[in-house]
Amino acid sequence: MSLEDEQEVLLPGSEDGPSGRAVQGRLPAICDPSRFAHRAVVLALMCFLGFGSYFCYDNPSALQAQVQLDMKVNTADFMQLYAFYSWPNVVLCFFGGFLIDRVFGIRLGTIIFSLFVCVGQVIFAAGALFNAFWLMEAGRLVFGIGGESLAVAQNTYAVSWFKGKELNLVFGLQLSMARVGSTVNMNVMGLVYQRIKDAMGSAGHTTLGVTLMIGAVTCLFSMACALILGYLDKRAEKILNKEQGKTGEAIKLTDVKDFPLSLWLIFLICVCYYVAVFPFIGLGKVFFMEKFQFSPLQAGAINSVVYIISAPLSPVFGFMVDRLGKNIIWVMCAVVTTLAAHLMLAFTLWNPWIAMSLLGISYSLLACALWPMVAFVVPENQLGTAYGFMQSIQNLGLAIISILAGVILDSRGYLFLEVFFSACICMSIIAVVMLYFVNHIREGDLNLTSWEREKQQKEAEVEARRALLQREASELRFRPLSAMALRIRYLTRLGAPLPEHYSSHLSSLAHRSVLK
């Protein structure tokens, strides 16, 4: 059946029935864009769209010892691989949504960003094959150009295909699949390297390059998902007259000057927290091997605990925070728990599974409580700029701290590095305390319960409706009367009969022949 035939079958009002429903059965449910089975296929493609990106993002962490040994680099140079990923996203996070909405469109944009991810990973692997570390850094730069923007495209597809309550579940599933990609990488890439080493008879940069090139297969898989998803979206657009998805982001850098103090404190919490999590995970595998004498397999498994825990807990915590409110309190709980986890790793020899489990729980809780607070402190027309600026500062902090963490580790060791991460978390705690008092003094709603917010929202809606009615009444009072209205008023004052075609119960003073 051709696309035109499918469109004729599925469009409402076709010749076979007044609503078109009688003929929709001609297509199997899995081929019908309006049916759940087809959208389930689309959802699976959306989830796997970012799998390759998240799998390859932490390739350096999973192979830290091998990269440093085979490429003969120190930890500071190794952490440049993460810094080069973050540098382009200091700027691109402002323009990713613009490129999708105004330049490429969602389908072409997704394919282009997927291509950047694939090419970046291939260049990264080629740098190892040719024993050129600068080429590996260039590959990570190209990879970073596509990685964050691909996540924006993924969310745009979700909004385009799913609405209402479905959307929360879809975002949760996408996040869970991203964490699955990171977890699989942490636990698999070391084994792949070992198998390649056994097959080639020795370790070295060639073995590393082949291993990374095998990792690029996941990026090719995600790009295939982008191509199929683009075709299905184009097909659904023609069949259902569905509008192509857009991010809806409106970025105005001039809005920065209007940001309140609360928002700047949220930015500070975000940066100080995440720079103590992601760089630690990037260096964590060797840390667990050296301090706790774990095997590479055990170290990779425990280093992935944060991602394993966040996969199922993120939707749960999101629902909990939505139902209970009190965002600042939850953020404080998450930050304090993270500090406890870092102190345990730094100063005790307790089983690190305890600390990493706490870190995974707090990481999931903070994401669910912190990021929604932006919408409470800025108007809707500034949300795109606020979130773009937040991501920009986060990537800038990650780029700088990644390099600094490598320098600290080379010169002072893991204990001093853990103290540094703990200091970053302490700064985040100070920012949370300041945010609490600023919100309290200004009577903000960041720490309201969900029912208090609901009551406040209803009162605001009532007030807005009252203001609208007053404005409309004011406009009616001063609106000039038409010739017909003047004539009716004159006849009414004289006590004369009104024209037959006039209906006195219509406030608009319109002719009966017009309103039917």
Image: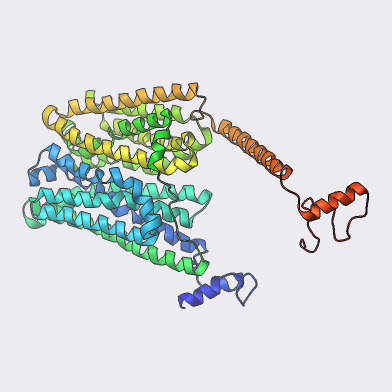
Displayed quadrant of residue 80: top left
Q: How is the image coloured?
A: rainbow
Q: Residue 406 or 360: which is nearer the viewer? A: 406
* Rendered location of residue 48, percent (x, y): 35, 56
* Rendered location of residue 377, percent (x, y): 47, 33
**Would residue 496 appear left or right of 178 to someone viewing this image?**
right
* Rendered location of residue 300, percent (x, y): 22, 42
The quadrant the C terminus occupies is: bottom right
Displayed quadrant of residue 306: top left
Q: Is residue 163 visible?
A: yes
Residue at 32% x, 32% y is: 273
Q: Residue 515 or 439: which is nearer the viewer? A: 515
Residue at 60% x, 74% y is: 14
Displayed quadrant of residue 429: top left
**Would residue 466 appear left or right of 454 to someone viewing this image?**
right
Residue at 21% x, 48% y is: 59
* Rendered location of residue 448, percent (x, y): 52, 29
In the rendered image, the vertical position of residue 490 relative to residue 429, given as above or below: below
In the rendered image, the vertical position of residue 311 relative to residue 397, given as above or below: below
**Would residue 321 appear left or right of 256 to someone viewing this image?**
right
Residue at 18% x, 25% y is: 416
Q: Residue 200 or 447: which is nearer the viewer? A: 447
Count every numbered label the image shows and give the total.
0
Q: Is residue 197 visible?
A: no
